Image (spheres, grey):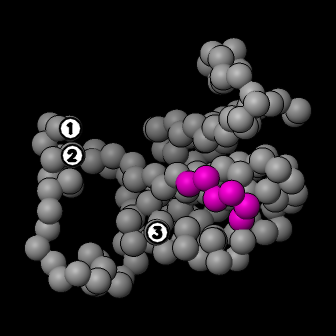
Amino acid sequence: MVQDQLAKRMSPTKRRAGRPRNGGRAVIPTVDNRGLAVLQLNVEGLTTAKLEVVRHLADSNGAAAVLLQETHCTSDNFLKIPGFHLAGSIHSKQHGVATFVRTEISWSTSSQSPPGSKIEWLVTKIQETSVINVYKPPPSELSATSLPS
């Protein structure tokens, strides 16, 4: 069943080039038996322009959650996407992660990496699904003990 759904989503569609699939309308996501749409992106430093691109990608693809890495933000003041709640963030001038969840979807923050950890992670429960947002900087070594259990 999952393979059939993936094949259907990956198959070419008949549409004119340059036209959005949803006719330019925002797609309001729902979490149901079809799954959870998640947008993940390493933004390499968050800017207003990048936030607008992220919002457009999330809306046009019906993303229920947005996971960003390398935000380079030192506070939550800049971490705003219209239509989304900031579910959690870890601040850093050089690294940083942020998880956003669509405003109409229920969520809770489960856990996050301890302060000062080399590998940053946030666990957010979106309805019945746990989503883990991880950033591992290049010099860090990834191991099972550095991640949530």
Q: Which residue is rendered at x = 46% and y = 38% of the image? A: 128
Check disc 1 and report the residue beneath it: 2
Q: What percent of the width, then of the height, locates residue 4?
A: 13, 42
Q: CA distance from mark 3 to mark 2?
A: 19 Å
Q: What percent of the width, then of the height, locates residue 98?
A: 69, 52
Instruction: Say whether residue 85 is left or right of residue 137.
Output: left
User: Which amino acid, mark 1?
Assistant: Val
Q: Which residue is rendered at x = 18% and y = 83% of the image? A: 16
Label 3 Cα neighbours within 10 Å, binned few <14 / some 14-19 / many ≥20: some
Q: State the image quarter where residue 143 is shown.
A: top right
Q: What percent of the width, then of the height, locates residue 106?
A: 54, 52
Q: Secondary structure at mark 2?
A: helix
Marks 1 and 2: in contact by CB < 8 Å?
Answer: yes
> The magenta stretch spans which residues?
41-46
Check disc 2 and report the residue beneath it: 6
Instruction: Say whether residue 49 is left or right of residue 54.
Output: right
Q: What is the number of the mark on residue 57?
A: 3
Label 2 Cα neighbours within 10 Å, binned few <14 / some 14-19 / many ≥20: few
Q: Secondary structure at mark 3?
A: helix
Q: State the image quarter where residue 60 is shown.
A: bottom left
Q: What percent of the width, then of the height, locates residue 56?
A: 49, 75
**Disc nearest the viewer among 2 and 1:** 2
User: Which amino acid, mark 2?
Assistant: Leu
